[in-house]
Image (cartoon, rainbow, N blue to C red):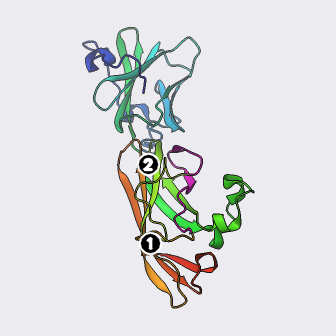
Amino acid sequence: MTRDHPHISRRNALRTVTGATLVSVAGCLDNSGNSGTPGVETTSSESQGPLKRIAVDGTTLVVELSAEANVDQVNLVQPNGELFGKRDVAAGVQQVSFEIGTAYEPGEYRVVALKGEETVVESTTDIVPEVQIQDVGLYRNNPDKPWDEVYGESKTDSKKNGEVFVTIQNSGSGPDAVVELRFTGDVPNPVDDPRRSGIFGKDNVVVPAGKTVALFSDSFPFGSEIGNEGMGCSTDGNSGQFTVVLETRVTGQEITKSYGVEYTGSDEMQNCEIAISET
């Protein structure tokens, strides 16, 4: 990810001079003591200080300045103390933004407002994603999902029967991107190493802070052909457990959730009844 002036030292980034008055987040707030939502809004919208509001919007950090703000530059400092970027503030401008994308370092960032060489005010905000798996389901049990919109109307129902949707939520304060989706355990076609990302039609899916998105598989985990280690359907019934595995870009961690599964009613997967439950 390209960043502005990545090798400027923390001291130069802040450009603090001796005797300059630093105003903390609390100092920017009104007397109500409302500090907002950590990482999403670090200063009160009714703040009387120059930094009126700091918020993550999608993959962008937005800094709103009060109408009375007497600053000519805003710096964003990374958790490691290096300068992420700087924005000049022309007369009358009340908002600047930093595109953080989904390749940033998660942690505490500092927003520093400057007038000339003097630091007027600074504030901190946590930008940390927290992606969780909420739900998983098959076409045969969830026909109301936008399967045709995702896969195209030309894909037959029997093919869609083998695919899966996974709903994920980012309850953190920064965006992330899912770069791989796979299924292990007791499914007909467990895939430890899917082709490309394992997400249909996409190399990755961005999950903004506070948002819920649906992923659609591209690895046919419940396909009619049973892999060497897969579990299929039988008239007597089979039951087991499978795991949904996600890999994300920002945190670089695996996110997993396991589900119980029962196969009943037929020897053929296309006619099988499949019940999924949380373990």
Q: In the rendered image, which residue does mark 2 sit on?
A: 172
Q: Main secondary structure of the magenta part?
A: loop
The picture quadrant where one finds residue 215 is bottom right
Label 1's element?
Answer: loop
**Is residue 167 visible to us here?**
yes
Is the Cβ of the residue at disc 1 closer than 8 Å to that at disc 2? no
Residue 185 position, x and y percent, is 40, 69
Q: Which residues are magenta?
A: 200-223
Q: What amino acid is found at the position of numbered circle 2 in the picture?
A: Gly
Please tell me which residue is depicted at 48% across the width and 67% down the height of the picture: 189
Q: What amino acid is found at the position of numbered circle 1 in the picture?
A: Gly
Location of the C terminus (image quadrant): bottom left
In the rendered structure, find residue 214 and report the number of the disc placed on it: none
Dot in front, 1 or 2: 1
In the rendered structure, find residue 230 and report the number of the disc placed on it: 1
Compared with 219, 273 (above or below) is: below
Please tell me which residue is depicted at 51% across the width and 91% down the height of the picture: 236
Residue 221 position, x and y percent, is 51, 65
As drawn, the residue found furthest toward the right would be 153
Compared with 53, 226 (above or below) is: below
